[in-house]
Amino acid sequence: MELGFIGAGRMGRPMVERLVGEGHRVRVHVRTPEALEALARVGAFPVASAGAAARDAEAVLVCLYDDEQVRAVCLEGELPAALSAGAVLVVHTTGSPRVVQALAARGATVVDAPVSGGPHDVAAGRLTVFAGGERGALECVRPALRAYADPLVHVGPLGAGQCLKLVNNTLFAAQIGLLAEAVRFARDLGVPEETLLAALPHASGASRAALGAAVKGSVAALAASAGPFLRKDLAVGAEVRAELGSARLGALEPALRALLLLLDGTTA
């Protein structure tokens, strides 16, 4: 496929490498000359602007940090005018469903496709992608996304991918908070944190958070590593809940408070 790519950073760069490796022609726009040079070496085509990346592309993939950056590039910049008729705009950024809906309201065919996993999952071709939007639009871009997405899950209409990802990240954040409380409980019983974390991944108390903490060496280290992304996504989730007026956290709330206390402690 003829693709444009915007935001080839920590997650986006291995995506571009996988796309090129699968035979796609990828024009990529990033801010730093070093990144452009590195991507050119793997066979991508660096361009000077988001509009140049989008021109004549069958699909444009956006992997930016937050909603503010997506709005700046996809609503306020030159990208909308540069999109070809029939091109699909794929937004990998985790954010508010209102943003991707605003892009569609401007006339773009949009698939919201937030991801779960890290750069190592991209490189291995096993990144989880939650896709929202028309099924026909998703099928148009499936040949590109399957370069790194497995599974690629269609979860509903436009915005559903963002909603599912926000729930996922809220649950993951709560699991880290619960794990912090479990570490405190274990210490009260005389069980060191390292002993607990070594055992949990093999037991019924296992979770992605427990495995991540075991790899990082402590719950605090996991929280510090994931903290910036989790704070951003929890803030977006709070905004979405405020807009709906009826979405409640229930039992997740005290676990999230425990996480925020841990994050405040690791950044103090």
Image: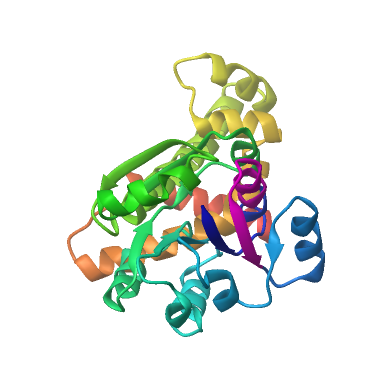
In the displayed structure, 121 sits above or below 69; it is: above
Q: Quadrant of the C terminus?
A: bottom right
Above or below for 33 versus 200: below
Q: Position of residue 168 (x, y in %)?
A: 39, 44
Residue under the point 67% across and 68% down: 30
Q: Is residue 22 magenta?
A: yes
Residue 251 visible? The answer is no
* Picture quadrant of residue 201: top right
Residue closer to the observer: 249 or 118: 118
Please, is residue 182 above or below residue 260 in the view? above
Residue 92 rendering spot, x and y as whole percentages: 47, 56
Name the residue: 66% across, 42% down.
21
Colouring convention used in this rendered image of the protein: rainbow
Residue 264 lies left or right of residue 169; in this view the side is right
In the picture, measured across the screen, residue 63 lies left or right of residue 101, that is: right
Task: Please provide percent x and percent y for residue 43.
Answer: 73, 52
Does residue 21 show up magenta in the picture? yes
225 or 61: which is nearer to us?
A: 61
- Give the magenta-colored segment's residue range: 15-29
- Asked whether residue 88 appears in the rendered view, the answer is yes
